[in-house]
Amino acid sequence: MSEKIRNDAIGIRKLVREAEAVSDEAMIACSRLKQAIVRARQNPQLSVDAGQKALLRLTQAEQQALSLSTNLLRVHDELSRLARETLGPDDDSGTQIAPSAIADDFSASVPSPESVSQADVVSAR
């Protein structure tokens, strides 16, 4: 294969790994934010529904971040397949992605903040 194709593949490999790392960092940031919100709302001076809509929206954002990560794994898998077909076997062991990691999303049904009533919030506590 041409040196241009090989150099493009190396650049793409680096960018895929960078995108995967950024999506992981987004999930970590969401997790930290959720933890801070839950800790803050334990203050007895706050109403029982303080931050509930924010937590629901944040949970949706976490699901979207996980979907992003899963889709990036699918991109990675497809590009790895293409590289093997175009460039032949890789020098190292190559990227191995378990089929279960790129299967259809198993997203839990998280209600939208608008669909949760005040009564639901109070009864959940």
Image (tube, helix red, strand yellow):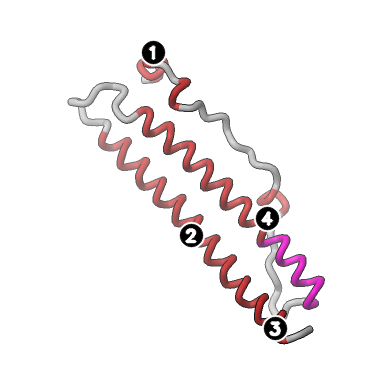
Query: Along the polypeptide, which appears first: circle 2 or circle 4?
Result: 2
What residue is drawn where x is 66% and y is 62%? 76
- Residues in magenta, as a range: 76-88
- Residue sticking out furthest to the front: 4
Marks 3 and 4 sit apart, C-alpha to C-alpha, by 24 Å
Say left or right for 45 vs 29.
left
Q: In this view, does 14 lie to the left or right of 112?
A: right
> Which residue is at the far bottom?
3
- Asked if residue 84 is among those painted magenta in the image, a careful observer would answer yes
Q: Does the magenta stretch include residue 51?
A: no
Residue receiving disc 3: 4
Residue ID for mark 2: 22
Residue type, label 2: Val
> Of callouts 4 and 1, which one flags the residue occurring earlier in the amino acid sequence?
4
Q: Position of residue 14 (x, y in %)?
A: 57, 72
Q: Name the residue under label 1.
A: 119
The earlier-in-sequence mark between 3 and 4 is 3
**Badge 1 amino acid:** Ala
Query: Which numbered disc, 3 or 1, marks the residue that appears first in the sequence?
Result: 3
Give the CA separation, mark 2 to mark 3.
27 Å
Q: Do the residues labelled 3 and 4 touch (CB within 8 Å)?
A: no
Crowding at mark 1 (Cα within 10 Å: few <14, some 14-19, many 20+): few
